[in-house]
Amino acid sequence: MTTTSPRQRLIEAAEQQFRRFGYRRATVEDVARAADTGKGSFYLHFASKEDAYVAVVEASLERFMVKAEAALHTPAPVPQRLRALVAVTAEHYGDDELLRASLFGEAALVDGAVARRTADIQRARIRELLVEALQAGKLEGSVRETVDVASTSTLLFEVGWAVVRAELDSSSDLPFDVALDTLNDIVGLGLIARAAPEEGASK
Amino acid sequence: MTTTSPRQRLIEAAEQQFRRFGYRRATVEDVARAADTGKGSFYLHFASKEDAYVAVVEASLERFMVKAEAALHTPAPVPQRLRALVAVTAEHYGDDELLRASLFGEAALVDGAVARRTADIQRARIRELLVEALQAGKLEGSVRETVDVASTSTLLFEVGWAVVRAELDSSSDLPFDVALDTLNDIVGLGLIARAAPEEGASK
DNA sequence: TACTGACCAATATTCTAACCTGGTCATGTC
DNA sequence: GACATGACCAGGTTAGAATATTGGTCAGTA
């Protein structure tokens, strides 16, 4: 029980406390006690309570990233991989209240500046994934060369989350698989009726 | 100054007060006074303060809808019309703090149940626009017959707002016209490299 | 050197009393 | 009668003083 490093123990204890009580109500003292150490030691490892929270979110996020990367690193064509990513995300975020609250700013667990900070971290990390996937798609030839990776990843990120949110929000009337199909369909083929697949079609 | 109907005067007065002080701080009494009428009369026209707020949002929304419909009802092909819609939206919502706050739940002007209610109204109304545009697109042949109008409108709504938000959020690093181009590009052509424009490409 | 917990300033909570405001309705006006 | 009004009330909100808690520090211990 005391075999892990103090920092590790602190992160684990902090995670438990934050998950149970939320950012505000969890106290540094309780975290330290739960990690079987003094409050002073807490500050040897983290500059502030907020930093500890960020560390917890980052650790949680890392666990999600493993799944997410697995979903993306398959031999399937890129659009199908994106679909898998959305599915995995909905599943994971459905279970992980802490990540969800930190991303959407659900006030029950976090809010204000901390929530914004952790939301940014998640967004950035997940968008990296999309950038990577898009570049891989270009290499393998399944994504058009002309696609602007930076802005496309931003937009993909938003539609992706729209679908995830529709799934997590029980009051939504958009069935998950329909949303997924549509996402794939639009992202894959666009809206335009096939006519002139040659040059210069937009702007 | 007293030529308009009492209800109209009340809505205008309410709009001024709500815009200036926000939903909570604006008082029914001040609204009535500003409309040059008694507080009791207020309740002849509105069942509650909240209903008056909704009426104000609806009136504001209607003014936006005029512009939005104008942007959509042009002879241009549908994707280009959608682009115009996004541009118009960004412009209008950039100026109209009340609509913006009511849609995004910016707490300065509104929050809680009222904000949710007015957000839903706006979402529904704007999504109708998209549904209409998609159907028109199908008729004129510029939108694929196979796209699912209901779910597509939902997703389009989300990307559209992502672009608008990127524009309104000054800290965003995504230039508006790049975002617009990308939106058009993806929605128009999808991501897939042109290869087999025949059958069964998704799912 | 590595750690700790008593300590402090700042913030949060609780309590109470005064105050305000959404909504009603008896009364007045046309 | 139909319509409009403002005095009135209950419930909720604010203000502010008194109290308790907590993030963060640091002198002291092992």
Image (spheres, coloured by chain):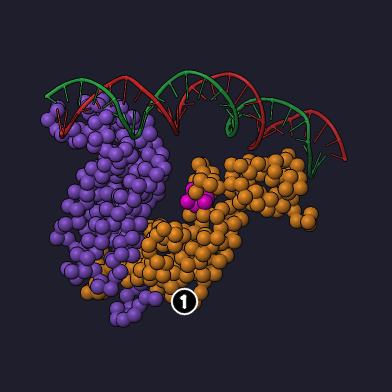
Chain colours: A orange, B purple, C green, D red
* Residue B1 screen position, x and y as percent: 14, 27
Where's residue B52, x and y in %?
A: 28, 38
Query: Would you say C27 lies left or right of A73 here?
Result: left
> Residue shown at 38%/64% (left/top)?
A174
Query: Residue B50, relative to residue A66: is it above or below?
Result: above
Main SS of the magenta part reads: helix
Q: Chain of mark 1?
A: A
Task: State which quadrant residue B99 falls in.
Answer: top left
Does residue A151 appear to the left or right of B138 in the view shown?
Answer: right
Q: Residue drawn 30% across and 61% down?
A: B153
Question: In terms of secondary structure, where does tag 1 sit?
Answer: loop
What is the span of residues highlighted in magenta in the rendered image? A101-105
For this rendering, which residue is in front, B163 or C17? C17
Q: State yes or no: residue A85 in magenta.
A: no
Quickly name the residue at label 1.
A76
Q: Quadrant of the C terminus of chain B?
A: bottom left
Along the line of sight, the residue nearer the viewer: B146 or A47: B146
On screen, residue A131 versus residue B184, left or right, reads: right
Relative to B183, is B15 above or below?
above
Q: Quadrant of residue B126?
A: bottom left
Identity of the residue drawn at 35% across and 73% down: B193
